[in-house]
Image (cartoon, grey):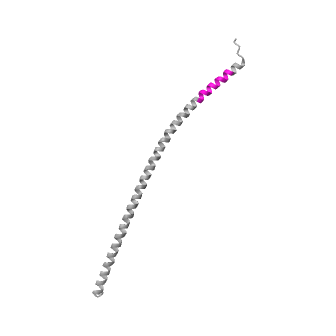
Amino acid sequence: MVYNPPMADDLQSQMKFIVEQQAQFAADIGALKEMIEAHSRQLESLTSNVRQLIEVNMSLTHHLEETDRRLGARIEQLAEAQAHSDRRLDALIDTVVKLVRRNGGAS
């Protein structure tokens, strides 16, 4: 029978525990590194998507501003045409009223 002092068993048990803990820590750190890399890739993808959304938003804003400008010009043209039509209609009404009065206005 081999005599092992009690401290040797305790020390060996403690060393085994420490080695197992270090192995677990190493595995956990490896898993964390993989997660960080995956999250970094996701962040890059999301950042790219946000940039694309900003570009689309800026483009839509530009087109909306251009459409508003063109619509404003068209409304102004329509108002001018309406005013011209009103003047011509007023002149026609005046002409008809004059003709009716000149012809006696009565049948």
Tell me the chief SS of the magenta region.
helix
Q: Is residue 63 visible?
A: yes
| Residue 7, image x, y percentages | 71, 20
Region in magenta: 11-25
User: Residue 21: percent from the left, percent from the top?
Assistant: 62, 27
* Residue 81 at x, y percent in the picture: 34, 70
The residue that appears at 37% across and 69% down in the rendered structure is 79
Q: Quadrant of residue 64?
A: bottom left
Where does the C terminus fall, quadrant-wise? bottom left
Which image quarter: residue 104?
bottom left
Residue nearest the observer in this picture, 99 or 42: 42
- Residue at the spot 45% in from the left edge and 50% down from the top edge: 54
Q: Residue furthest left?
A: 103
User: Which of the 4 image quarters holds residue 72?
Assistant: bottom left
Residue located 43% across and 49% down the image: 55
In the image, is residue 99 part of the stretch drawn in magenta? Answer: no
Q: Position of residue 58 (x, y in %)?
A: 43, 52
